[in-house]
Amino acid sequence: MSKSTTTAKKPSKPSKPRWTPHAYQRKAVKFLLEHGAAALFLDPGLGKTSVTIAASKILLKEGVMRGALIVAPLRPARTTWPKEVAKWADFEGLDLAVLHGNDKERLVREEHDFYVINYEGLAWLFSFAKVGKVQKPVLTEAGKALLKNVDTLVWDELSKMKHPGTLRYKLVKPWLKKFSRRWGLTGSPASNGLLDLFGQCYVLDEGNALGQYITHYKAAYFLPTDKMGYNWRPKEGAEEAIHARLQPLALRMDADDYLTLPKQLDHVIKFDLPPTVRKQYEELEGELLTQVDQHLIVAANSGSANSKCRQVCSGALYLPTVDPVTGAVSTNGGRKADRKWVLLHDDKLDELERLIDELQGQQLLVAYDFNHDLERLLKRFPNTPYIGGGVSGQRGEELEAAWNRGELPLLFGHPASIGHGLNLQESHAHHIAWFTLTWDFELYDQFNRRLRRQGNHSEHLHVYHFIARNTVDESVMYALRRKNRTQKVLLDALKTRKRVD
């Protein structure tokens, strides 16, 4: 009698979902396919990443694209792009290599459909060599290997290329012609004004829309507002002319037109500086110096005074690393994370604590700017997790998951660290507090959009701003609103193409 055997059936892997694009996503895919140089000015939540992958898949399948180099901030490079390729059944078979970490030397020499690198990694691909007295652009060995396999360049968060004077811009500019297709993705193209547009457009179309040189762009459309030429304002009719120049290059989509998102409600919580601190603030603002305890605080210029005044409003002030009288160098290192500071007041902390008490355990995301902000926040609210300088990508992902499970009632975040690549909407949290405001509207907007995203079913997003009355805090708040209006006018002008519902 033979022995009967049975074979246990292995459980099948759960099938991946299909990527079923909305009509507006199909429109964006079509736009990329039809344009060698293209900008998608799409709000977060509209699927810029999946749209780009879908368009690339079509071109790869048709044999008209070799591969793509995707340049992204570090967190999206390491997490968002790989996850998006792995998430959908439609993208199976596509191969993505992240050029970061110990494996990058091997990966860059292999054939892949996508190579993703962070902005700081561009110097690993492109460089300069001194020939006589001239610096000439050269490809590194990694760059040579890469260009054999790619012909498409994708800028994720295109706004990072807005300044033509930066090293990243200078490194890539000589090699743009090597890419027959250049696409840029951002939701904040003009967060700090229309001057931001030149660099972003040039790395896509090499000057077709806004010209070959930033100096010519300024002369054609702007007037200086100071003798040194630091600040510029558009000439009469310039905004409309710039909008028209961008129409063929950029596709604009507003999340509010296609998604149901929480409505943002802004709250301003004002307080008065203590009399002694008010005196110190006015001395710094007007005379560029003040005395704090035994320390003489000197601002080298109005920009430095502005930064110090913002610190005063928040409650602390960095001490100088060089004594302004003796010239002695401080022994505390000089790095911001190590610098000593002096406490001035706790008024913002008190206001934040009152807000937390009022929320009665509802989740609150708190934005800070200075390291002494974080130190004082952690002293007042011990064991609160934070995402900022020195926090690893893995730790950031762990905190993201815990927040989305509703396990963290309070989370501190620096806008530069938390503004891209994190989705914090899944717990339906709807409260944000700005302990210290930033001048940068892009950082401000992107931070708020960590919660104001598709999937957050809250009716409103409440954004609280702690403002010291009659100080630079009010100026920053006004500037953010003005920058928002400038960008909104641009983006509204670019929405004139027929809306797809």
Image (cartoon, rainbow, N blue to C red):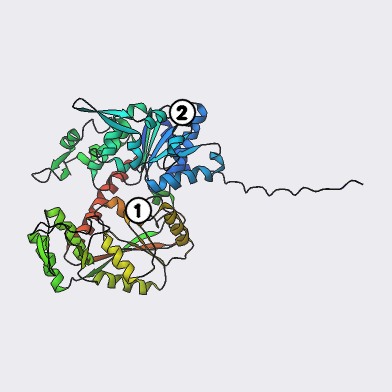
Tag 1 secondary structure: helix
Residue at 30% over, 50% down? 442
Could you say which disc has been placed on residue 131 in the image?
none
Label 1 crowd (10 A; few <14 / some 14-19 / many >=20):
many
Instruction: Give the spatial CA distance, label 1 vs label 2.
Output: 33 Å
- Mark yes or no: residue 15 visible: yes
Residue at 8% over, 61% down? 286
Is 346 situated left or right of 383 in this image? Answer: left
Q: Nearer the viewer, residue 466 or 407?
A: 407
Residue at 53% over, 46% down? 87
Residue that mark 1 sits on: 417
Tag 2 secondary structure: loop
Q: Nearer the viewer, residue 411 or 59?
A: 411
Residue that mark 2 sits on: 66
Where residue 99 sits in the image (x, y, percent)? 42, 39
* Residue 468 against residue 493 in the figure, above or below: below
Sequence-first disc among 1 and 2? 2
- Mark yes or no: residue 425 visible: no
Please name the amino acid that badge 2 sits on: Arg
Where residue 324 sits in the image (x, y, percent)? 10, 58
Is 331 situated left or right of 387 in this image? Answer: left
